[in-house]
Amino acid sequence: MPPLISREEALELGLLRDPQAIEALVERAWQARVERFGDSTDMCSLVNAKSGGCAEDCGFCAQSRFAEAETPMHAMMDPEQILEHARAAEAAGAHRFCMVTQGQGLSKRDFEKILAGARLVAENTNLKRCASIGHMSVARAQALKEAGIQRVHHNVETARSYYPEVSSTVRYEGRLRTIEAVKEAGLETCVGGILNLGETPEQRVEMAFELSEIDPDSVPINLLNPRPGTKFGDRDFMDPWEAVKWIAIFRLILPRALFRLCGGRVENIGDLQPLAVKAGVNGVMMGNFLTTLGNTPEEDRAMFEHLGLNVARQPDNGSNPRPDNRAGWLEGPTPDVVEDYLDAATPAGEVEVRLWDPSSQLRFAKKAKVPPRPDGALNAG
């Protein structure tokens, strides 16, 4: 499906400031979302399976070794630990589960742990399974597919023209090669980026149309949550109405992609999160993010249900996807059975719903020595 608006109209819509005009734009985006997806949702939860000490210099990330910021530090989780987090995500009402690691790629040993974790999640839960593990070859993407991974996440982060300001050690072209490798292996793609990194409105439109050309199955939208000690650590939060407006614009440019609202949504959008969902969002990242917290799962489910959207999971989530992607649609209406299903699937005492709280459960460590950033920029905040 091609974009529903042109570049010129997207730029004009980007100039909107009046809340009433933005609400009219949101209604337009809502219709585009409902026409494609009906009342279905796609709620995701992630596990930060390997954290800290990243060798890259992405300006937004506290995990970079070039950032003067405290960050969670732990080696690759064992497969059984990954499964524990997946079970907690399932009990909280997530539809899918993503295993995330820092860096451009994984060692053979760490990659094998991801494969083993994916197999355990596939065997022991009804979650759809995703991975975000940096750059990869077609062979590695195929190995992920064989282990039960269905979708691979790999962001472009920002517009090509602004990308050199974001990272000098991870090439934009390398990101595109990984996305192509994922497609060649027959996996779904999840490709998005971060708003408010310092890009212009023109570059936001550029990014949206670049994503349209990539044609991903899923588009995660992040909003910068400035981390002190990073290159972008002194930036202000995005105005909530501005954030809602751009979500709606992206929806009209990418009408058939799943939209997921992820990092920074609480800090940047706050009480306007329900309006952001109406601007075209299919789901959110539930619970926690890589190093920060989000809403509670109960708050997220209530936010979608208030708009008449269905957050129920299917007993066969993993093998037969809900009507949320191009792989196929289930016949008939989506049943509203989330609470009954959770009660039946997780008998008392079998699973403890304990989402990871980065503020209390992870060891935050100061970096003993921080090398100068390769791009010569200073850290801020």
Image (cartoon, grey):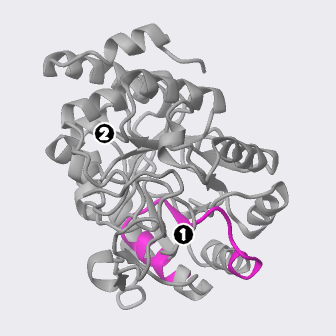
7 on left or right of 305: right
**Quadrant of residue 10 in the image?**
top left
Tell which of 50 and 59 is nearer to you. 59
Q: Position of residue 225 (x, y in %)?
A: 30, 53
Label 1 and label 2: CA atoms lie apart by 32 Å
Identify the residue at horizontal 25%, vertical 39% (top origin): 307
Is any atom of residue 324 visible in this view? no
Location of the N terminus (image quadrant): top right
Look at discs 1 and 2 and give the one toward the viewer: 1
Q: Which residue is mark 2?
A: 277
Location of residue 276 with respect to 52 vertically, above or below: above
Binning the other alpha carbons within 10 Å of mark 2 as few (below 14), some (14 to 19) or many (20 upward) gives many
Binning the other alpha carbons within 10 Å of mark 1 as few (below 14), some (14 to 19) or many (20 upward) gives some
75 on left or right of 117: left
Tell which of 309 and 218 is nearer to you. 218
**Residue most toward the bottom?**
349
Q: Position of residue 347 (x, y in %)?
A: 39, 84
Q: Which residues are magenta?
A: 83-111
Q: Position of residue 170 (x, y in %)?
A: 62, 52
User: Is residue 110 part of the magenta span, yes or no?
Assistant: yes
User: Is residue 238 part of the magenta span, yes or no?
Assistant: no
Identify the residue at horizontal 36%, vertical 77% (top origin): 356
Mark 1: amino acid:
Cys
Q: Position of residue 70 (x, y in %)?
A: 34, 75
Give the structural element (helix, strand or loop) at label 2: helix
Give the structural element (helix, strand or loop) at label 1: loop
**Quadrant of residue 15 in the image?**
top left
Q: Which residue is mark 1?
A: 54
Is any atom of residue 329 visible in this view? yes
